[in-house]
Amino acid sequence: MKPSHLVCTAAALALTAGAAAAQDRSNWPSSFTMGTASQGGTFFVYGSGVANLISEELGVSGAAEVTGGPMQNMALVHTGEAAFGLTTLGPARESIEGQNPIAPGLAMDNACAMFPMYETPFSITALSSSGIESISDIPDGARIGFGPAGSTSDTYFPAMLEELGVNFERRNGGWDDLGGQLQDGLLDVIAFAAGVPVPAVSQLEVQTDVNIIEFTEEEQAKIVEAFPVAGFDIPADTYTTLEEPARAVSMWNFAIANCDLPEDFVYAATEVVMSDNERMMNIHRSAATTTVENWDKNNVLPWHPGAARWFNENGASIPDDMIHGG
């Protein structure tokens, strides 16, 4: 074949491939939303970054949505009001079992795993001026901010502190708002369940002196036995306040997708997120664990077929019985 014919043939193949790619997108949504949480929390920063990244790379209009966090995101993704969302495996399990307070009795089983995010540490912050340096220092009737109503923090942290014998007044709100209330003396403590560094805590450190309060070994063991969490150490370099790792507990977070989304769309979105971890780290440092090898941390959600295909092509071994429709 003459060179000119080779060029023409290559051009024709390229045009055919381009047309096929365009045709493959015919069932893709024209836009999408990503359910996150309140501003000032890690879910919002991480989810906003992921939504922007997917939108830019795939050429599909998309944006993050401020929500009440994991429980609401499970509901939004289950119904299809949001294509994607972020959740924590504890609230995800409760939602699948019909225990989501947004719709009690409804099994939210149409939200599928998309990719692992990071562990959510449960940590406590107080102003240094309060004199609170340990959980046992928290006074009776302390005003404690637990984040947005229905969030992972609000769902589990009050029960954890009750398990440890703490008596408190429960307050809810966005993390930025609660951080302002702590600084103004309207709260005694904030009990955070969010990926570290928590933006609201980092901001507080700039403005005032704070204490990052860790669990004792005995407190940690008691909570691990009573709740679906694991032991975790907050690295010393997470906050300027810390001089050594802080003992805590944690729960895994996963991004989720509506199970009815086209397989090739979710495959492409998963590839955008998972193919460049350095880019994800630029969104938030917690994305250090948004890696293929952490696929096995999900023992709750069915996998979306598109996400499962990408992971299995890249070193995972997700079994068929863990894939939606498999």
Image (tube, rainbow, N blue to C red):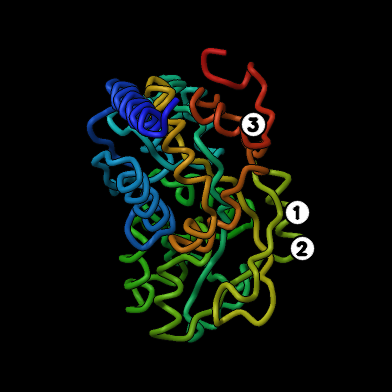
The residue type indicated by label 1 comes to Ala
The residue type indicated by label 2 comes to Glu
Residue 217's label in the rendered image is 2
Q: Residue at x 52, y 46 (%)?
A: 275
Instruction: Give the answer, above or below, for where 317 lies relative to 124.
Output: above
The reply to whether residue 307 is visible in this rendering is yes
Under tag 2, what secondary structure? helix
- Nearer to us: label 3 or label 1: 3
Q: Are marks 2 and 1 in contact (CB under 8 Å)?
A: yes
Image quarter of residue 28: top left
Quadrant in which the N terminus appears: top left
Under tag 3, what secondary structure? loop
Residue 180, position in %: x, y? 32, 73
Residue 221's label in the rendered image is 1
Under tag 1, what secondary structure? helix
Give the Cα distance between marks 3 and 1: 22 Å
Give 47 or 140, whichever is nearer the viewer: 47
* Residue annotated with mark 3: 299
Instruction: Give the answer, above or below, for where 212 lies relative to 175.
Output: below
Q: Badge 1: how crowded within 10 Å, few (<14), some, or many (20+)?
A: some
Q: Earlier in the sequence, mark 3 or mark 2?
A: 2
